[in-house]
Amino acid sequence: MKIRKDFKMQTVGGEHIILLQGNLGVDTTKIISFNETSLFLWNLYQNKEFTKEQIATSLIEEYGIDEELATEDADMWVRSLIQHSLID
Protein backbone atom coordinates (compact mmCIF):
# COMPACT_ATOMS: atom_id res chain seq x y z
CA MET A 1 0.00 0.00 0.00
CA LYS A 2 1.04 3.58 -0.50
CA ILE A 3 -0.52 6.94 0.41
CA ARG A 4 -1.64 8.74 -2.72
CA LYS A 5 0.65 11.63 -3.64
CA ASP A 6 -2.19 13.99 -4.54
CA PHE A 7 -3.28 14.38 -0.91
CA LYS A 8 -1.40 16.69 1.42
CA MET A 9 -1.77 17.18 5.15
CA GLN A 10 -2.48 20.75 6.27
CA THR A 11 -2.68 22.31 9.71
CA VAL A 12 -5.59 24.74 10.10
CA GLY A 13 -6.47 26.22 13.46
CA GLY A 14 -4.38 23.60 15.23
CA GLU A 15 -6.18 20.74 13.45
CA HIS A 16 -4.38 18.38 11.08
CA ILE A 17 -6.63 17.90 8.05
CA ILE A 18 -6.82 16.75 4.47
CA LEU A 19 -9.20 18.51 2.13
CA LEU A 20 -10.60 16.13 -0.47
CA GLN A 21 -10.64 17.65 -3.93
CA GLY A 22 -13.96 17.87 -5.76
CA ASN A 23 -14.41 18.23 -9.51
CA LEU A 24 -14.24 22.02 -9.38
CA GLY A 25 -11.65 22.47 -6.65
CA VAL A 26 -11.79 21.96 -2.92
CA ASP A 27 -14.97 20.35 -1.62
CA THR A 28 -15.02 21.60 1.97
CA THR A 29 -17.78 19.17 2.88
CA LYS A 30 -15.13 16.45 2.72
CA ILE A 31 -12.53 17.21 5.35
CA ILE A 32 -10.63 14.45 7.12
CA SER A 33 -9.21 15.36 10.52
CA PHE A 34 -6.23 13.45 11.95
CA ASN A 35 -5.34 12.91 15.58
CA GLU A 36 -1.69 12.90 16.68
CA THR A 37 -1.27 9.16 16.09
CA SER A 38 -2.74 9.36 12.58
CA LEU A 39 -0.48 12.32 11.86
CA PHE A 40 2.54 10.34 13.10
CA LEU A 41 1.69 7.44 10.78
CA TRP A 42 0.91 9.74 7.83
CA ASN A 43 4.26 11.51 8.18
CA LEU A 44 6.14 8.25 8.64
CA TYR A 45 4.64 6.44 5.65
CA GLN A 46 4.03 9.27 3.20
CA ASN A 47 5.90 8.48 -0.05
CA LYS A 48 6.67 4.89 1.07
CA GLU A 49 5.19 1.46 0.49
CA PHE A 50 3.90 -0.10 3.72
CA THR A 51 2.00 -3.03 5.19
CA LYS A 52 -0.33 -3.27 8.17
CA GLU A 53 2.38 -5.20 9.97
CA GLN A 54 4.85 -2.34 9.51
CA ILE A 55 2.29 0.12 10.84
CA ALA A 56 1.68 -2.05 13.90
CA THR A 57 5.43 -2.29 14.53
CA SER A 58 5.74 1.50 14.29
CA LEU A 59 2.94 1.94 16.82
CA ILE A 60 4.58 -0.50 19.22
CA GLU A 61 7.94 1.27 18.92
CA GLU A 62 6.52 4.80 19.23
CA TYR A 63 3.86 4.28 21.91
CA GLY A 64 4.93 1.10 23.71
CA ILE A 65 1.54 -0.59 23.24
CA ASP A 66 1.06 -4.33 22.99
CA GLU A 67 0.96 -6.17 19.68
CA GLU A 68 -2.77 -6.94 19.77
CA LEU A 69 -3.75 -3.28 20.24
CA ALA A 70 -1.19 -2.13 17.67
CA THR A 71 -2.57 -4.61 15.12
CA GLU A 72 -6.15 -3.45 15.74
CA ASP A 73 -5.13 0.22 15.46
CA ALA A 74 -3.15 -0.41 12.27
CA ASP A 75 -6.14 -2.18 10.75
CA MET A 76 -8.48 0.70 11.67
CA TRP A 77 -6.07 3.28 10.22
CA VAL A 78 -5.73 1.41 6.93
CA ARG A 79 -9.50 0.87 6.67
CA SER A 80 -10.03 4.59 7.18
CA LEU A 81 -7.51 5.45 4.45
CA ILE A 82 -9.19 2.98 2.09
CA GLN A 83 -12.65 4.34 2.93
CA HIS A 84 -11.54 7.85 1.94
CA SER A 85 -9.54 6.65 -1.09
CA LEU A 86 -6.28 7.98 0.36
CA ILE A 87 -4.15 4.97 -0.57
CA ASP A 88 -3.33 3.13 -3.79
Image (spheres, rainbow, N blue to C red):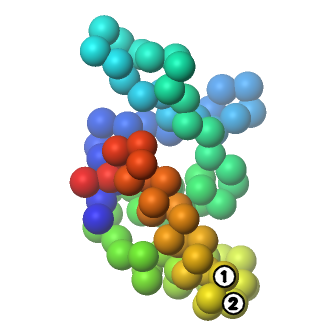
The N terminus sits in image quarter? bottom left
Secondary-structure class at tag 1: helix
Secondary-structure class at tag 2: loop
In the image, taking residue 53 as reference, residue 12 lies left or right, namely right
Q: Residue at x 61, y 90 (%)?
A: 67
The circle on residue 69 is 1
Residues tagged 1 and 2 counted as in contact (Cβ below 8 A): yes
The percent coordinates of residue 8 (x first, y second) are 43, 37
The percent coordinates of residue 38 (x first, y second) are 59, 56
Number of residues whose C-alpha sits closer than 10 Å to that of mark 1, classed few (under 14), some (14–19) or many (20 or more): few
Q: Residue at x 42, y 76 (%)?
A: 52
- Seen as rendered, the residue at the extreme bottom is 67
52 in relation to 47, above or below: below
Q: Where is mark 2, residue-wise?
A: 66
The C terminus sits in image quarter? bottom left
Q: Kindly identify the amino acid type of the residue bearing the numbered disc 1.
A: Leu
Where is residue 68, by image quadrant? bottom right
Number of residues whose C-alpha sits closer than 10 Å to that of mark 2, classed few (under 14), some (14–19) or many (20 or more): few
The percent coordinates of residue 44 (x first, y second) are 48, 63
Q: Kindly identify the amino acid type of the residue bearing the numbered disc 2.
A: Asp
Q: Residue at x 42, y 43 (%)?
A: 84
Q: Can residue 62 be spotted in the picture?
A: yes
